[in-house]
Image (spheres, rainbow, N blue to C red):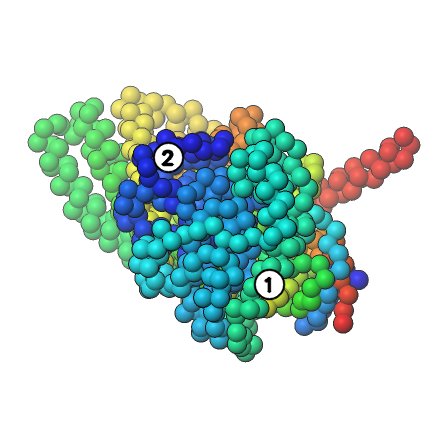
């Protein structure tokens, strides 16, 4: 499934980020493919906020559609 | 002047002086270090080819250079390009690292270390990390990175002296052995390890400097670097407590619409109460009327009157109604200065608390519909401070398309702090239904123009990808310093422009041009907008500065609806000279000119429509004012639906024609 369908509180693994620029920038923020993260918040029709340790990142809904994830 | 590969930043480096560069992620505390190291001696240069300003100052014969806060030096935006060039030519880099966000910040640290420049690390905010239950082993961190690490709490001046004394201890750190080998192969050809690294990371500009093709190894290097950083962090950080702090709960509440929107309104309402009611009323009442008009102006008039008659031409220009020595000082110091200080105080509070990125997340959905993403809320809010400054910060937006939309909306519909102050003051004298009408019209224009641009401009806007820093209680000292610096910058910029405006207006007055212009513009001001013909003076003043125009209106006897119409027109009216200049600098001439002309047309068109509607439907009772509002909403909805349908049809006809081909 893709990241835009994740629910608040769920843990998930990033399988693939289908955008080279986003992939690089996510790595800098500490988020890479293959890592386990949690969903902090889902803004209705808006961004998804994900968390890894103390790091929180908000991703736009369109962008979340380009990220493949799997749940545990 | 020191040699610098292609970056040619205009800084005079004395013979034998070292270039000490401060680098770090956004909000790591670099500026506190910069101020400590350079004292008051600070110079600001424009970085060539950009409007980014780089501060530099002296430290015992060496030059300290600040860089913009970045997450890496990989040319994702202008800030990164500037930071890259300054870091590549550094003799020493002081890397300021936020201890709470070690995992994120060390990515930049390792990238800088990989460039081979000598580094010393200021591990900042260790007190906050401790409070959150983190213990960081500094010695081990220093050992693993291969560079000195000094724990600091910059705002309490802890560890600052040690940094200053140990700059000479900075050294090149450790890179991954594989990466090191790869770089060594390239170093012979390009002459420096830093340039070799960036070419390998696929930096086109650096590669071009050496006539090479960029190598596409960015992702491999990044992944390897991320792994290395993660390992270091697991080794040096212990005891992470996982308790849910109140700040976490608040952070969530700010992001969710259900609670986030009320929080936003509460923040705006507090701002309005303090700036619009208290500062604009009580404080300005004292500074403008009692202090400036009551004491300052008579003193200046009687002093100058000793030498020149007030009725003479020179007298009118110096101490007349729009006098250089009277009105300029009263407006800038008595009226605008308190309002501007109030606004920058709030802006600094928002910035330092970490609220802005959360606001960006909250409004992302809304801004997507006008072709922007949530990040654009930052320039739009900064625009409420100063449109000129905000126009420059649109550089943080992801695409040219977004910059175009944001810059135009800033010039058109975002009133700057000084203007906002005057507007708030004037709105305080009309009924709440009129305040609502004003806000509704400005908001409707913002939405309609944004939707139109989003539909008509080709291409797609970028998506939101933003780091949410920790929420924290702003340090009052820091907020005060920021407010002071920004207000001073405003004063420096506004004063000459105001003086120029006063000079132009009083010259017009003396030569009779003012009355002539008022008469020429009468069909527009009197017939179309329903204002007294003297309002033309305010518009002419508004060309110099919008707040100047608004201030001109403040002195006029206007009815409630006239106040609203004049404020709508002056808000949408052309931005001030300074922001026009920046607009021309940031965009090409044709585009900037088109934007400028459009603001004139839209301002008078919308002001006129509201005036005609009010005349037609009446505004004597609140119910009638609400009817006008309902019509405005209906018109807005009509345009938006029309634009959407048009776009849909266009896409369909495009795809059918493609199908035929």
**Residue B96 place in picture, x, y as percent:** 44, 56
Q: Which residue is mark 2?
A: B11
Q: Residue at the spot x=52%, y=74% of the render?
A: B238
Q: Are marks 1 and 2 on the same chain?
A: yes
Is residue B234 shown above or below B482? below
Q: Which residue is mark 1?
A: B230
Where is residue B279? Give x, y as percent: 33, 56
The N terminus of chain B: image quadrant: top left
Front residue of B246/B13: it is B13
Query: Residue B545, image x and y in percent?
Result: 39, 36
Instruction: Tell me what residue is drawn at x 37 percent, y 23 percent.
Output: B516
Label annotation for residue B239: none
* Chain of the residue where label 1 is placed in the rendered structure: B
Q: Of residues B38 and A12, which is closer to you in this image? A: B38
The answer to whether residue B218 is visible is yes
Q: How many marks?
A: 2
Tell whether B437 sits left or right of B182.
Answer: left
Residue B420 in the image: state x and y as whole percent.
41, 48
Q: Quadrant of the C terminus of chain B?
A: top right
Looking at the image, which residue sits at the far right? B660
């Amino acid at each position: 499934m893709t990241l835009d369908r994740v629910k608040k509180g769920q843990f998930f693994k990033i399988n693939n980020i289908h955008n080279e620029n986003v992939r690089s920038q996510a790595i800098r923020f500490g988020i890479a493919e293959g890592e386990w993260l949690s969903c902090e918040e889902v803004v209705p029709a808006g961004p998804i906020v994900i968390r890894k340790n103390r790091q929180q990142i908000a991703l736009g809904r369109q962008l979340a559609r380009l990220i493949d994830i799997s749940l545990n | 002047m020191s040699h610098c590969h292609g970056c040619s930043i205009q800084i005079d480096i004395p013979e034998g002086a070292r270039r000490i560069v401060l680098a770090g992620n956004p909000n790591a505390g670099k500026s506190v270090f910069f101020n400590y190291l350079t004292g008051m001696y600070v110079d600001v240069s424009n970085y060539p080819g950009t409007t980014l300003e780089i501060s530099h100052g002296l430290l015992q014969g060496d030059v300290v250079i600040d860089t913009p806060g970045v997450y890496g030096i990989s040319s994702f935006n202008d800030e990164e390009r500037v930071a890259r060039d300054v870091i590549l030519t550094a003799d020493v880099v002081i890397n300021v690292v936020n201890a709470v966000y070690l995992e994120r910040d060390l990515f930049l640290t390792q990238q800088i270390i990989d460039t081979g420049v000598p580094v010393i690390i200021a591990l900042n905010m260790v007190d906050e990390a401790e409070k959150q239950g983190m213990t960081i082993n500094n010695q081990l961190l220093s050992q693993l990175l291969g560079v000195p690490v000094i724990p600091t709490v910059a705002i309490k001046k802890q560890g600052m002296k040690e940094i200053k004394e140990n700059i000479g201890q900075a050294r090149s750190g450790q890179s991954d052995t594989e990466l090191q080998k790869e770089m060594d192969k390239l170093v012979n050809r390009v002459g420096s390890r830093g340039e070799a690294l960036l070419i390998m990371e696929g930096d086109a500009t650096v590669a071009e400097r050496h006539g090479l093709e960029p190598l596409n190894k960015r992702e491999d290097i990044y992944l390897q670097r991320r792994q290395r950083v993660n390992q270091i962090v697991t080794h040096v950080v212990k005891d992470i407590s996982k308790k849910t702090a109140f700040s976490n709960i608040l952070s969530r509440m700010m992001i969710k619409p259900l609670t986030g929107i009320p929080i936003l309104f509460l923040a705006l309402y507090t701002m309005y109460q303090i700036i619009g009611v208290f500062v604009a009323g009580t404080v300005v009442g004292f500074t403008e009327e009692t202090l400036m008009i009551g004491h300052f102006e008579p003193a200046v008039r009687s002093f100058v009157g000793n030498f020149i008659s007030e009725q003479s031409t020179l007298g009118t220009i110096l101490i007349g109604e729009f006098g250089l020595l009277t009105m300029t000082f009263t407006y800038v110091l008595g009226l605008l200065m308190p309002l501007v200080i109030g606004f920058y105080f709030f802006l600094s509070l928002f910035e330092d608390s970490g609220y802005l990125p959360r606001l960006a997340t909250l409004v992302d959905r809304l801004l997507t519909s006008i072709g922007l993403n949530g990040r654009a809320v930052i320039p739009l809010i900064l625009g409420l401070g100063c449109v000129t400054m905000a126009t420059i910060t649109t550089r943080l937006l992801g695409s040219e398309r977004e910059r175009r939309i944001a810059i135009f909306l800033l010039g058109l519909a975002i009133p700057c702090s000084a203007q906002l102050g005057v507007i708030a003051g004037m709105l305080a004298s009309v009924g709440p239904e009129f305040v609502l009408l004003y806000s509704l019209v400005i908001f409707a224009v913002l939405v309609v123009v944004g939707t139109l641009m989003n539909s008509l401009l080709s291409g797609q806007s970028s998506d939101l990808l933003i780091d949410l820093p920790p929420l924290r209680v702003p340090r009052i000292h820091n907020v005060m310093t920021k407010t002071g610096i920004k207000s001073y910058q405003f004063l420096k910029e506004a004063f000459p422009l105001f003086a120029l405006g006063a000079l132009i207006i009083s010259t017009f007055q003396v030569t009779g041009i003012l009355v002539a212009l008022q008469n020429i513009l009468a069909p527009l001001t009197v017939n179309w907008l329903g204002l007294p013909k003297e309002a033309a003076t305010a518009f002419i003043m508004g060309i110099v500065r919008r707040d100047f125009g608004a201030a001109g209106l403040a002195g006029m006897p206007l009815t409630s609806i006239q106040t609203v119409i004049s404020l709508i027109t002056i808000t949408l009216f052309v931005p001030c000279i300074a922001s026009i200049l920046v607009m021309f600098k940031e965009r090409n001439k044709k585009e900037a000119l088109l934007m400028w002309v459009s603001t004139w047309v839209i301002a008078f068109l919308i002001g006129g429509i509201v005036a005609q509607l009010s005349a037609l439907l009446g505004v004597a009772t609140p119910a009638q004012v609400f009817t006008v509002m309902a019509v405005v909403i209906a018109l807005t909805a009509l345009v938006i639906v029309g634009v959407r349908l048009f776009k849909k049809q266009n896409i369909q006809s495009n795809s059918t024609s493609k199908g035929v081909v």
